[in-house]
Image (cartoon, rainbow, N blue to C red):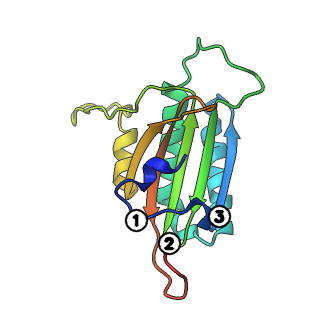
Amino acid sequence: MLEPLRRGLPPIDPAAAAGAVSCALPPRYEAVRGARQFTRTTLSQWELTERFDDVALVVSELVTNALRHALPADTPRDPHEAPVRLHLMRWSSRLICAVRDPSHTSPATRETDEDCAAESGRGLFLVESFSDTWGWHPLAGSLHGKVVWALFRLPQDRDRPQD
C-alpha cells in the first residue's frame, strides 16, 4: 500500500514504522465522528496531540469523500466487509493518514466559485492545504479499490534517528 508514497520522497521503510493502526468504518456519515475519535486516541498514544486539529480535519475530509463519492447508495455491498478503512502510520519524521475505499475512480479537486456559499467541493483543497502532500493510488492484487493518503511531516527530535 505504501509503494506510491516512496516516489519523490525520502525512503519510507514500512518495517521501520514507529506505529501503524487501522480501523474499519461503516458506510454511514456517522463514521466521520468515529474516525476523528480514533485519530484523537491514536495521536494521544503517539504523543502527537499537538497535530490533532490538522490531522483530524484531513481525516474527516478523506473519510467524507470516500463515503460520498466511493460508495454510491445503489452499490451492492458484502455485509461482512467494511467498505472504508482508515490507516494511520507513524515514523519519527512523518505521519500518514490513508483511507481505503472500493472505488477505482480517482479523486478530483473541483473548482469552486468564491462567491458561491456551497461547502461541497472543498475537501481536497483542505487536504492539500493542511497536509504536506497527498495523493492516491489504485490497489492491486486481492485488494480492490484505491487508497487516498495525506502525509504530515513531524518535527525532528534530535535524539531519534531519522527515517
- Mark-to-mark CA distance, 3 and 1: 18 Å
Disc 1 marks which amino acid?
Pro
Query: In screen coordinates, is 49 left or right of 3?
Result: right
Tell me where residue 27 appears, x and y as whole percent.
65, 28
Q: Secondary structure at mark 2?
A: loop
Say which of 74 and 160 sits in front: 160
Note whether 2 is above or below 91 in the view shown.
Answer: above
Note whether 147 is above or below 152 in the view shown.
Answer: above
Q: Which mark is residue 10?
A: 1
Residue 17, quarter of picture:
bottom right
Disc 3 marks which amino acid?
Gly
Label 3 crowd (10 A; few <14 / some 14-19 / many >=20)? some
Residue on which the image places disc 2: 163
- Residue under the image location 40 percent in, 49 percent down: 134
Q: Are marks 2 and 1 in contact (CB under 8 Å)?
A: yes
Residue 82, quarter of picture:
top right
Tell me which numbered mark, 2 or 3, is placed earlier along the sequence: 3
Tell me which numbered mark, 3 or 1, is placed earlier along the sequence: 1
Image quarter (top left, top right, bottom left or bottom right) of the N terminus: top right
Query: In screen coordinates, is 115 left or right of 134?
Result: left
Disc 2 marks which amino acid?
Asp
Tell me which numbered mark, 2 or 1, is placed earlier along the sequence: 1
Say which of 103 and 9 sits in front: 9
Q: Which mark is residue 19?
A: 3
Label 2 crowd (10 A; few <14 / some 14-19 / many >=20)? some
Tell me where residue 18 appears, x and y as whole percent.
63, 68
Q: Nearer the viewer, mark 3 or mark 1?
A: 1
Label 1 crowd (10 A; few <14 / some 14-19 / many >=20)? few
